[in-house]
Image (spheres, rainbow, N blue to C red):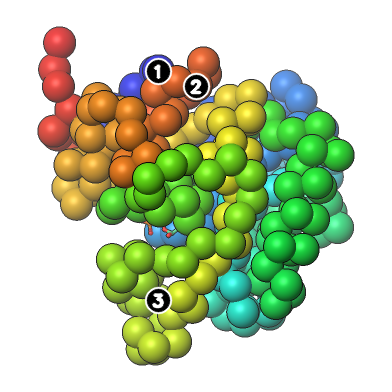
């Protein structure tokens, strides 16, 4: 695991954007696994800048997002499809038909999840999977559990996740209680993994996830077993990591 500690959020965002930009430049038809949340906003803004500066084109890139709320249709302002359009897809030259987000509007959870997993497999997998980190160690929406879920599945969100994500909704009762998410197995199948985390409030979970025991109670800890993981942190998020 390669851990890169940056001075601040801006440097973290630029460093993470460089890793994605370099991949897109080297392999213009790469497949990116994308994430939502506040953490990647800065790096998406940097990718948009790189595109506008003529450094990268997304026209041959395919994308698969990690997750989507169950029950929100793609035009809902809190849907992850809407988030991706606003923060990246509508601002670059990507072919929207090559972008994939689980279908939160499909009430048939088994079908929606099976279709998504099959689409990723039929496509040949993901070259680089971007991940943020939930405060409880969730990746995608894989919440702490007694076992690691392998494929795309429907999860019940924990109270802490609902509370954390309610900041983006008008009220907590509007936050969906379930989501469709790539499984831990889906995530671990990506060739490369890039994790971003910033802020003091992530310091404890960063230390537990990357330097503590591997356990499904801290889903991100499984990443310690992946052969190609880069973790980009700001100083605050790295502040509880052991020093050599
Ligand atoms: C959500 C998403 C995760 C994301 C997490 C952290 O629950 N499903 O993919 O990593 O939030 O979000 P933030 O970056 O806002 O802390």
Q: Which residue is the site of mark 2?
A: 226
Callout 1: helix, strand or loop? loop
Please state, as top left, top right, bottom left or bottom right, where the N terminus lies in the image. Answer: top left
Q: Which residue is the site of mark 3?
A: 168
Callout 2: helix, strand or loop? loop
Residue 193 position in % (x across, y down): 53, 30
Residue at screen point 34% across, 22% down: 3
Q: Which residue is the site of mark 1?
A: 1
Pointers 1 and 3 in contact (C-beta within 8 Å): no
In-front residue for pair 140/5: 140
In-front residue for pair 235/165: 165
Q: Gap between marks 2 and 1, in whole Å?
A: 8 Å
Q: Which mark is residue 35?
A: none
Other-residue count near label 1 (Cα within 10 Å), few / some / many at <14 / 14–19 / ≥20: some
Please report whichever mark, 1 or 3, sits nearer to the chain's N-terminal start.
1
Please state, as top left, top right, bottom left or bottom right, where the C terminus lies in the image. Answer: top left
Q: For marks 1 and 3, give the one nearer the viewer.
A: 1
């Amino acid at each position: 695991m390669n851990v890169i500690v940056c001075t601040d959020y801006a440097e973290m965002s630029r460093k993470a954007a460089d890793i994605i930009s370099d991949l897109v430049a080297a392999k213009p038809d790469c497949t990116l696994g994308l994430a939502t949340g506040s953490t990647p906003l800065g790096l998406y803004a940097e990718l948009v800048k790189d595109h506008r500066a003529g450094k990268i084109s997304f026209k041959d890139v395919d994308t698969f997002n990690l997750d989507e709320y169950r029950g929100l249709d793609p035009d809902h302002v809190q849907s992850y499809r809407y988030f991706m359009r606003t923060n990246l897809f509508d601002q670059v030259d990507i072919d929207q038909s090559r972008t994939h987000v689980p279908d939160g509007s499909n009430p048939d959870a088994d079908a929606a999840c099976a279709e998504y997993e099959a689409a990723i497999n039929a496509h040949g997998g993901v070259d680089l999977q971007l991940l943020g980190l939930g405060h409880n160690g969730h990746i995608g929406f894989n919440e702490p559990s007694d076992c690691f879920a392998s494929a795309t599945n429907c999860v019940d969100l924990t109270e802490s996740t609902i509370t954390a994500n309610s900041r983006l909704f008008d009220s907590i009762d509007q936050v969906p209680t379930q989501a469709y998410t790539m499984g831990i197995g889906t995530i671990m199948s990506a060739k490369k993994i890039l994790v971003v985390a910033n802020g003091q409030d992530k310091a404890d979970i960063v230390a537990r996830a990357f330097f503590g025991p591997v356990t499904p109670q801290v889903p991100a800890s499984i990443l310690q077993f992946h052969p190609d993981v880069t973790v980009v942190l700001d100083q605050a998020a790295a502040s509880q990591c052991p020093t050599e």
